[in-house]
């Protein structure tokens, strides 16, 4: 997996990022907010002696640094290239960063966020809330089908999906706390809040989201 995000800001600045399916080494020294014990997630299984820095924070660092002083709602043009196609959208910086940061986190090597890595392989830039629900549920049910094929007990009631997104919410909250103090602008912060809101829609209101999907699918 190789994904490129290419930002063109209103003032003409161009900022590019590459995301691969393996974490990229970042040169030291790293800022204090990336250290594992700084606002460490309550459900983090890592130990500082083995992993001095939070993998998700390290992966996010170049993006956070690039946009730490930027306004969330400024218009940007973003082109996203992957191995198969390109996407182009005029949007707000917040939406573009939500998409990029979500991909960065899923491929960061964080043990909790790595549950999203298989979805990231089929990354959909700028996914709406409805698309996120559809992709999350469809992907999870496919995992259960493969579990059944391998004589494991499938979870057709989606209880594991709800639990997964509850774990993701804890990580999102901690990551927001990590970067809060180092961001002068609100672009990174609002992007993470947006991502947090999408994850919470699965863990808090999945049934109502499924009813909306059911109405659309059965009517088609």
Image (tube, rainbow, N blue to C red):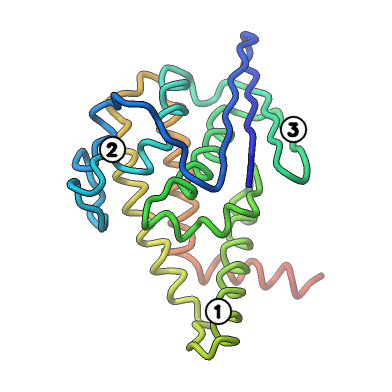
- Residue 71 on image: x %, y %: 48, 20
Q: Which residue is mark 2?
A: 177
| Closer to the camera in the image, 32 or 9 | 32
- Residue 61 on image: x %, y %: 40, 30
Q: Earlier in the sequence, mark 3 or mark 1?
A: 3
| Residue beneath the point at 23% across and 41% down | 52
Q: Earlier in the sequence, mark 1 or mark 2?
A: 1
**Relative to 21, 83 lies left or right:** right
Cα separation between marks 3 and 1? 34 Å
| Residue beneath the point at 57% across and 21% down | 74
Q: Which residue is mark 3?
A: 88
| Residue beneath the point at 79% across and 72% down | 219
Q: Which residue is mark 1?
A: 144
Cα separation between marks 2 and 3? 31 Å
Disc 1 packing (10 Å; few <14; some 14–19; many ≥20): some
Q: Secondary structure at mark 2?
A: helix
Viewer-nearest of discs 3 and 1? 1
Q: Earlier in the sequence, mark 2 or mark 3?
A: 3
Disc 2 packing (10 Å; few <14; some 14–19; many ≥20): some
């Amino acid at each position: 997996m190789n994904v490129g995000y290419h930002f063109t800001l209103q003032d003409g600045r161009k900022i590019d990022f590459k995301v691969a399916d393996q974490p990229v080494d970042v040169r030291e020294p790293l800022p204090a907010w990336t250290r594992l014990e700084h606002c460490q997630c309550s459900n983090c299984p890592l130990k500082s002696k083995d992993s001095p820095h939070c993998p998700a924070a390290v992966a996010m660092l170049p993006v956070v640094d690039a946009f730490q002083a930027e306004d969330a709602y400024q218009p940007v043009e973003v082109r996203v290239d992957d191995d198969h196609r390109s996407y182009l959208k005029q949007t707000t910086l917040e939406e573009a960063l939500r998409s990029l940061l979500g991909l960065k986190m899923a491929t960061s090597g964080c043990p909790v966020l790595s549950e999203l890595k298989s979805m990231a392989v089929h990354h959909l830039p700028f996914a709406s809330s409805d698309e996120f629900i559809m992709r999350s549920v469809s992907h999870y049910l496919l995992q259960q089908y493969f579990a059944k094929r391998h004589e494991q007990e499938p979870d057709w009631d989606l209880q594991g999906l709800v639990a997964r997104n509850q774990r993701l919410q804890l990580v999102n909250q901690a990551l927001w706390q990590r970067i809060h103090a180092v961001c002068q602008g609100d672009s990174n912060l609002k992007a993470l809040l947006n991502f947090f809101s999408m994850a919470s829609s699965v863990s808090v209101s999945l049934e109502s989201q499924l009813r909306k999907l059911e109405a659309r699918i059965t009517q088609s």
